[in-house]
Image: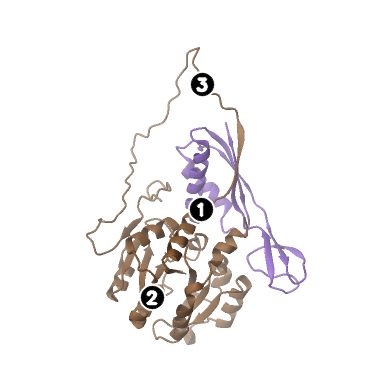
Amino acid sequence: MHELSIMQGLVDAVLDRTGERPVAAVNLRVGSLSGVLPDAMRFCFDVVAAGTPLAGARLQIDEPEGVARCRSCAEEFVLADLILLCPCGSADVEVLSGRELMLMSVEVA
Amino acid sequence: MCTTCGCGDEANTRVSTLQQPEGMLEHEHPHVHAEGHDHPHPHGHGPGHEHTVHHPETITLEQNLLAKNDLLAARNRGWLAGRGIRALNVMSSPGAGKTTLLVRTLAELGARLNAGVIEGDQETSLDADRIRAVGRPVIQINTGAGCHLDADMLRRGLDALDPQTGSTVFIENVGNLVCPALFDLGETAKVVVVSVTEGDDKPQKYPHMFRAADLVIVNKADLLPYVEFDVDECLRQIRQLNSHAHFLVLSATTGEGLAGWYDWLDNASTRSDTLTESLTDAH
């Protein structure tokens, strides 16, 4: 349940910026290879946001898929998991996206 | 994290030296769960009442969700480097043999290795007691409901341990192959222990942990004749996730293969913080 610690950090980071202003929405980018589950984040968000100006805010999570580039054949391909293997057989690949774990913006009322 | 309400404060994380009466070094931040929970109540405003008007707006933040932990980890890394101390973050599932490996290592290397230990467990000081029996400095961190150590807990542990310049600090993380993988502590290297009784598919099941490792130790090798654990298959899976990790097969109980671990320890002082690199390359 590392999502709970992460969401507590999120609430702290937002409050640092918005203070007492009610927050209507929080926009996150959480890649499919980040090791963090969006569903668990939503569940934990409700718990940690309760009693703060973030209570009831919409949590909008953009979930970019994993994309990698093969250093051997230069092809870009979708990474479904962290197993770094190009369809050409090479394991020398660079992860381009999917590991994001970012607080992008908040909408305040 | 609070077990009563799930709120994320670290009220019940406890750092203990074991050498002082219970509670001496505890950081207690009690908070009250009152039955009568206070809520703001709406109240009317008469005419002529001035408000500061905020218009709805979107505030761009674009920051890493782990930024706070990563900052504290960077601070730990600088603190350690400045004192020439190497910190090894030892992680595994519960019961893989982390404490047995550390106890044997400290006992066998004796004065050859100037080392202290920071023990992370949800509850009890049982592991710290085993280390202390070997005569080494040890600090127990109890995370309460928490499932991993974070950089702030390590800082508090280091403050309490007060390791000597040029020494080694073993950090025995909470037994868990999931959460500790995401939290950089500022350590010099990450050591992941997997035991043969757990099955050779662990790397595939917990890829984040094995991707982050600098060294993977297969422990309980003395049990290999009795279990279906294919060492080559385990290594093959690790290589699909992590091309640089070192790989050792040993038994902390019989001592088989420990020479390789001691060699690694002799050469591990300058290992790079590979997780930090792999995390930051995504941002």
* CA neighbours of label 2 inside 10 A, class few (<14), some (14 to 19), many (20+): many
Q: Is residue B142 visible?
A: no
Frontmost of labels 1 and 2 is 2
Location of mark 2 (residue): B102
What percent of the width, then of the height, locates residue B164?
A: 35, 68
Residue A76, quarter of the rendered image: bottom right
The answer to which of B272 and A65 lies nearer the viewer is B272
Say what secondary structure mark 3 lies in.
Answer: loop
Q: Residues within 10 Å of mark 3 (few under 14, many from 20)?
A: few
Q: Amino acid at mark 2?
A: Leu
Q: Residue at x 55, y 38 (%)?
A: A57
Q: Where residue A41 appears, x then y in whole percent?
A: 54, 50
Q: Which amino acid lies under the numbered mark 1 shown in the image of this protein? A: Glu
Q: Reading the chain from its start, which is encountered first: label 2 or label 3?
A: 3
> Which circle marks residue B41 in the picture?
none
**Badges 2 and 3: C-beta atoms under 8 Å apart?**
no
How far is mark 3 from mark 1, CA to CA?
37 Å
In the picture of the structure, the residue carrying the numbered disc 3 is B51
